[in-house]
Amino acid sequence: MPPESIATASPLAESGTPDVREAGKSYLFALAREMRQGKRMLPDAVARYAGTSEIRIAIASDGSVAPPQLLKSSGNPELDQAALAMVGAALQRTSVPASLLGNAFDLVLPISFDSTE
């Protein structure tokens, strides 16, 4: 999952002050890095499938993050659950930067699985 595809999903990447945009990009790259690590730990059963799940993340202005929600299924319940687990784990390990506090925002992340990776 290239971080560039995640960064374009963020409303922060295109709005707000330059500091907010930069903090938004940094946050997305940090999430992407954590998700890539989580992807390596997926069970072999999931690794043989391919598909893309769309996951919504809602971040409140105080920096609290709601549990990720499945917006669009990959068509495979195992992949969808793996995507939700991967994003949830990445959110637990990635703090919202202080410069983003005071801004409530949603992110929609396409999580792609490819059996050839």
Image (cartoon, rainbow, N blue to C red):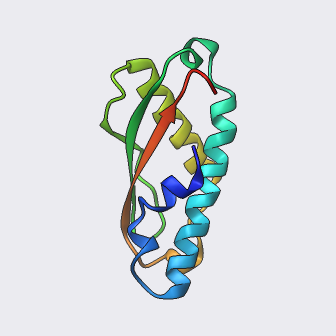
Q: Residue at x 50, y 78 (%)?
A: 21
Q: Residue at x 48, y 23 (%)?
A: 50
Position of the N terminus by quadrant:
top right
Q: Residue at x 56, y 68 (%)?
A: 25
Q: Residue at x 37, y 66 (%)?
A: 105
User: Which one is in front, 113 or 65?
Assistant: 113
Q: How many marks?
A: 0
Vertical arrangement, residue 35 with respect to residue 18, above or below: above
Vertical arrangement, residue 45 with respect to residue 59, above or below: above
- Residue 1 as seen in the image, left or right of residue 17: right
Q: Position of residue 5 (x, y in %)?
A: 49, 53
Question: Extreme bottom residue here?
Answer: 17
For residue 15, which quarter of the picture? Answer: bottom left
Position of the C terminus by quadrant:
top right
Q: Position of residue 78 (x, y in %)?
A: 45, 19
Question: Extreme top residue here?
Answer: 45
